[in-house]
Amino acid sequence: CKGSIATKDDYVMFDIPPAQAEVAIRGFMVQFEGSEHPVQNIQVYLEKTGVTGSKVSFKGTLAIKDNTGTYDDTYGGWVDVLFIANLE
């Protein structure tokens, strides 16, 4: 990513509709590409956006910023999502 905060909408399908479901961050990695930078801010955010039948939707956000004040450097990374569901 370069020049912005990375977001992704995604979903998981369960075999049966969950009575309740939540998402949590299990782990993440984010780093600048090319060279080292002093880190000012790292954003890692995850939210459940809906449950429809067997489908649990979520949105993830990932970003890293150096001390220049803007998201202008190329970076990469990932967020590992943990799903917690009551499948009565």
Image (cartoon, helix red, strand yellow):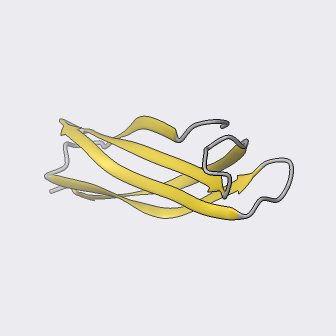
Give percent across and percent down for residue 44.
49, 56
Residue at the (67%, 63%) spot, across then down: 39
Residue farthest right in this picture: 35
The relative height of residue 8 versus residue 41 in the rendered view (above or below) is: above
The residue lying toward the viewer, choosing from 47 and 21, is 47
Q: In which quarter of the image is the C terminus?
A: bottom left
User: Picture quarter containing residue 40?
Assistant: bottom right
Q: In which quarter of the image is residue 56?
A: top left
Q: Tell me what residue is drawn at x 26 percent, y 41 percent.
A: 49
Residue 17 is situated, as x and y percent measured from the top left of the image, at: 19, 43
Rendered location of residue 8, percent (x, y): 47, 37
Q: Nearer the viewer, residue 37 or 28?
A: 37
44 left or right of 70 in image: left
Reply above or below: 47 against 86.
Answer: above
Residue under the image location 13 percent in, 52 percent down: 19
**Residue sticking out furthest to the front:** 68
Which quadrant of the rendered structure holds the N terminus? top right
